[in-house]
Structures are given as C-alpha cells and as structure tokens.
Amino acid sequence: MQRRFFASGMVMACALDSAPLAAQPLAWDKIAGPDGRYRLKMPRGYRYLTVPAHGGTLHSYVFVLPDKLTLELLDVTFASPQPNVPTAPAALQSALEQIQGGMQKSWPGSTVLEARPVTLGALTGREFVLAAGGDRVVTVRVYVTPTVVYTQIAVCPAAERSNAAIPEFMESFRLA
C-alpha cells in the first residue's frame, strides 16, 4: 500500500540532460509544513500541492529546474495511525528496504549506488542513491511513522550529483 502513493505523488516527468547547472546560486525560502510539524528550505519558485491520498493527505513541495534538477518533499499524513508500521529497529529497517525496492521500480533499470540508515531527531529512516535512466541520479530519504511518511527526493544528471543544492535541501528538513 505504501509504495503506491510514493509513485503516484512524485512529479518526475522531466527528462534530465547532462549539461552543468547554471553557475548562479539558487535563492532559498524557509518554509514550515502543515501545522508547523516540520521546517525545510526550498529553492524560490517551488510549487506546493495538497491532495487527499490513501485515507489522509499528501503535501508536496516541488522545485523543478528543467533539464537540470528536481527537488521534492512528499509528506503523506494519515487520518488515523497505521497499525502495520513497525517500530522495532530490525522490522523498521526491513520495511524501509521494502519501500526502497518499491520506489526503485519508479525508475526501471535503476541500480543502487549507495544505501544507508539515516536519523532525523528520534526517527530512523533510509537514504539511497540510484543510477537511473541513462545519466540521471536519484537521491531519496524516507522516514516512516504510524501517522506520517516523509520522503525527500532529488533528481539530477549524473554530472550534477555533487551539486550543493542537493545537500542544502536534504539537510534543511527538520521536525518541529
């Protein structure tokens, strides 16, 4: 069930080429999520979308620099706690690996370049990097709780993998 909303919520339709990102720095906005549950930085010009999804609400913040970079935060908040979300560390890691496998299907033929556990305050999540679709690189962080799933996604040409905007976006996400 969880894998479906990840794929349906992503706005990844742009094709990326290998031309380097423009030299000018991005201007960043500091934003707070719904009900002040989290804070993050998004490049100016991002779009916000909220829609009903899977018995809850999907909040999506998306920035697209055509042919260069896509940054997205997906926040799926459930109307009631999901009883099947594991809390034991080993079970949670297994669930996060399954989510990674499900998300990897969104990029057919992709391969895992890196994968590791990450923490956000008291939450344990997973970060993984995929080589996808020719020269694209996809970086994902996902955190799962019984009431919300947070997913950060960055997509860029392989030549831009070390672009400073990616860690700026990834490291800016903080729970309130």
Image (spheres, rainbow, N blue to C red):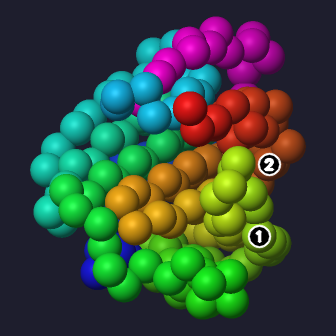
Q: Earlier along the polypeptide chain: callout 1 or callout 2? A: 1
Q: In which quadrant of the rendered view does residue 116 lie?
A: bottom right
Badge 2 amino acid:
Arg
Q: Residue placed at 48% from the left, 43% from the top?
A: 73
Check disc 1 and report its element: helix, strand or loop. Answer: strand
Magenta stretch, residue numbers: 19-33
Choose between 21 and 43: the one closer to the eye.
Answer: 43
**How many residues crowd mark 2 within 10 Å: few (<14), some (14–19), many (20+)?**
some
Q: Is residue 65 visible?
A: no
Task: Say if the magenta span includes residue 20.
Answer: yes
Q: Which quadrant, please, contains the C terminus?
A: top right
Q: Residue placed at 57% from the left, 61% from the top?
A: 142
Q: How far from the left and from the top, in percent, is residue 107?
A: 50, 73
Picture layout, residue 167 above or below residue 154:
above
Q: Is residue 85 left or right of residue 129?
A: left
Task: Say if the magenta span includes residue 160.
Answer: no
Choose between 158 and 39: the one closer to the eye.
Answer: 39
Q: Is residue 4 visible?
A: yes
Q: Which quadrant, please, contains the N terminus?
A: bottom left
Check disc 2 and report its element: helix, strand or loop. Answer: loop
Which one is closest to the eye, mark 1 or mark 2?
1
Q: How far from the left and from the top, in percent, is residue 122?
A: 68, 55
Which residue, as the protein is rendered here, is positioned at the far right? 162
Q: Residue placed at 14% from the left, 50% from the top?
A: 52
**How many residues crowd mark 1 within 10 Å: few (<14), some (14–19), many (20+)?**
some
Give the labeled residue for mark 1: 117
Most prominent secondary structure in the magenta stretch?
Answer: loop
Q: How far from the left and from the top, in percent, is residue 163?
A: 80, 36
Give the labeled residue for mark 2: 161
